[in-house]
Amino acid sequence: MKHSLPDNDFVQRSHVGLRLLSYILGFSFIVTMATSSFILFSDYKRGVSQVSHNLNQIQSSYQQSVSYSLWNFDNRQIESQLNGILNFPGVVYVYIESRNKLIQSAGDIYARTDHQYSFELTHQSAAQSYQLGSLYINVDYSGLYDDLKHKAVNILVSQFLKTFSVSIFVLFMVRQLITRRLSTMAEWAGAFNLKNLDQELTFPGNKQRSDELDMVAAAINQMRNTLKLDMIDRQKSQQQLEDTKEQLSVAIDNAALGFCQYYPNQDRLTCNNHFARQLATTQTELESMAHPMDRFRDLIRGIKGPEQRERINQLLYGRISRIHGEFTMVNFRNEKCYFDITFQIIQYNESRPHEVLICIVDKTKEHTASRQAQELAVSLENKVTQRTEELYDEQQRANATIRKLQTRLDRMEADSSSITQMHFDGLLLKQLEKLSAENEIEATSCLAVYQKYLNISLNDQTTAIDMASCIQSWLRESESFKDIQTNTKLPFSLMMNENPGLVVFLLEHLFEQEPVLENCRQFELELRVDHDMAFVVATFDLVDGIEETPEHPHVDLSHFIVTSRFRGEFSRKLVSPNRLETRYSFSLFPDQMDT
C-alpha cells in the first residue's frame, strides 16, 4: 500500500490471500518432498533388507540340500531346487559353477542384475570336506523400484490434494475473517481526519466474539477518543496559554523585573519601565540612546567587571549563548547598585545573534542586608570567641576541683578498705583467741574454713551466674539434707555477677554447719527479689522446741561476707521454739552501689 497517495489513487497490487496460498503451497511442497524422500528411503532400505533376508534364508535352506544333490549327481533334483530358488522375490537367475565350469542353471541369464550373491557348496564325508563348487544368485531390484515409484506417485498426489484443499479453505477463512475486515479498516482510515473524530470503526457481523482484529479496532477507537479528548484539551490549553500570556504581562508590569530586548544588527533596544527605572533613567531615553550596549557595559564595576564585559562581547559575537551572574554597576545617577542579570540569545541570523533578551533584578537591598549580616556574624564570632575563652578558664578551674575531689574520694576508699580489712582481722583474731582454749581438732577445722575463704577471696573469679541454678545444684549434692524433707521456692532464673565458689562456700558453712540441723525435720529455702536486692530465707522446722538460739560456729564470718562482699544484711533468729530462721540479702548490682 502507498499511504502517501490520496485515497482515490490507492492501487491494490497484490492479494494477501494469494500470497498466503503461494507460501502455504511452497512450504507444503518442501515438507512433502522431505517427508516423501524419508518414507521412500526407508521403504528402499526395508526392501533391500528383505532381499538380504531372503538370500540368507536361501543359504540356510538350500546350501546343504543342493550340496547333497550335487554330490550324488542328481541333476533332476538340482534343477528342481534351482527353480525353487527362482520363486524368491527379486531372484532372476541362479547357477552352479565348479572349477570355472557351469554345472547347472535356471532363470534368465540376460535379465538385469543389480546384485549377485554366492555361497560355497561342500560335502562332508568320513571326517573329510570336499569342495564341490559355488552357487550364484542374481538379484534384480526392478520390482522394488516399481513399488517405490508407485508409492511416490500416490504420496505426492494425495499430499498435493490435501494441501491444496487445506490451502483453499485457509484462503477462504482468511478472506472471511481477516481480509474483509482489513478492507473495512482501510476504508475507515482513508476517510479519517481530525474533523470527523466521532465516526467509529466497526465491523459487520457477529458482535459476540472478539479476536485480534476486534482488539485492534477497539484500540483504534480508544485512540480516536483519546485524540478527541486531546484536541479538546489542546483547545483549552491554547485558551489557557493566551490567558497566561495576559496574566504574565500584567505580572511583569507589576513585578520589579526588568526586561530588555537588544537587536545587535540595528544596535537598538526595547525595554519596560522596570528596566529603565532600575538604571535610574526613563524608557524613552534608553530606547533612543545611541550605542546602548556600549553604554550598558561602561556602567559595570567591581573586581569581575573586565571579565563580565569580555563575556558580553563574546555573547554579541555568538561564541556563547547565555550569561548569568551578579553584576556590580552604577546607574545613570552614579549610584552603586547590585543586579542579578541574565543575557540570553533567543534568535540567530547566520550564526550571529539577531535578538538578545536581557533580564535584570535589583539585588541592592539584599546585598546591603547580606553585608550587614556578615558584619553582625563577625561581631557574634568575636563575642563567641571571648565567651569560649571564659568557659575554657572555668573548665580548667572545674577540672582542678574535680581532681581535688577525686583525691579525697581515693582517700575515703582507702580508709573504707582499711576498715573492712580491720574488721576481718578482728574476726580472725577473735577466732584465734577462741582456738587457744579449744582442742586441736576444732582449732584445725576453724583454721581450714578461714583458709578456704582466703583462697576464694585471693583467687576471685567473678562471672555471670544463675543464683537459682547454683542453689539447686548445691542442695542436690549436699549430703546433710538428704534425710530431711526439703521445700524450695526459687525463681526460674536470677542472673548476677559473683564468684560461684564464694556463693557455695556461704551456703555450705551457713546451712550445712547449722547446730539445729540434727533436730530438724523440714528445711525450707526461699529466694526472692525486691527492687535491686535479692533475699535468701532459710527456715528450719525443729522436732523438739528450744528456748534460745544456739551459737553458730561461722556466723561471724557469714555476717562479714554478706555485709562486706554482698553489700547486704544478715540475721539469724528463733521466731518460735520450733522454728529457726536465717536470712541474708545481697545486691544484684554491687558495682553501682560502689559508684
Image: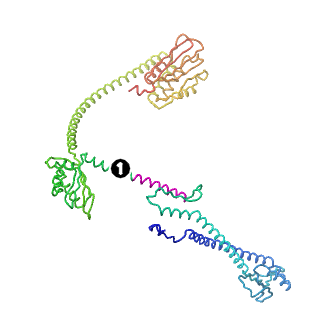
Camera-side residue of 432 and 40: 40
Q: In the image, what residue occupies the spot 58% across and 62% down?
A: 177
Residue 339, percent from left and from top:
21, 48
Residue 96, percent from left and from top:
78, 85
Q: Quadrant of the C terminus?
A: top left
In-image side of 518 versus 262 (left or right): right
Q: Is residue 416 visible?
A: yes
Camera-side residue of 131 and 242: 242
Q: Secondary structure at mark 1?
A: helix
| Residue at the outermost bottom position | 101
Q: In the image, what residue occupies the spot 56% across and 23% down?
A: 488
194 up-or-down from 21: above or below: above
Q: Which residue matches tag 1?
A: 240
Camera-side residue of 584 and 378: 378
Task: Determine if the magenta segment contains residue 8.
Answer: no
Q: Is residue 73 visible?
A: no
Task: Determine if the magenta segment contains residue 230.
Answer: yes
301 up-or-down from 386: above or below: below
Q: Quadrant of residue 135?
A: bottom right
156 up-or-down from 202: above or below: below
In-image side of 407 versus 181 (left or right): left
Camera-side residue of 328 and 541: 328
Q: In the image, what residue occupies the spot 73% across and 79% down?
A: 143
The magenta-colored residue range is: 213-234
Count of numbered tags = 1
Residue 282, percent from left and from top:
17, 50
Kind of residue indicated by mark 1: Gln
In-image side of 499 versus 235 (left or right): right
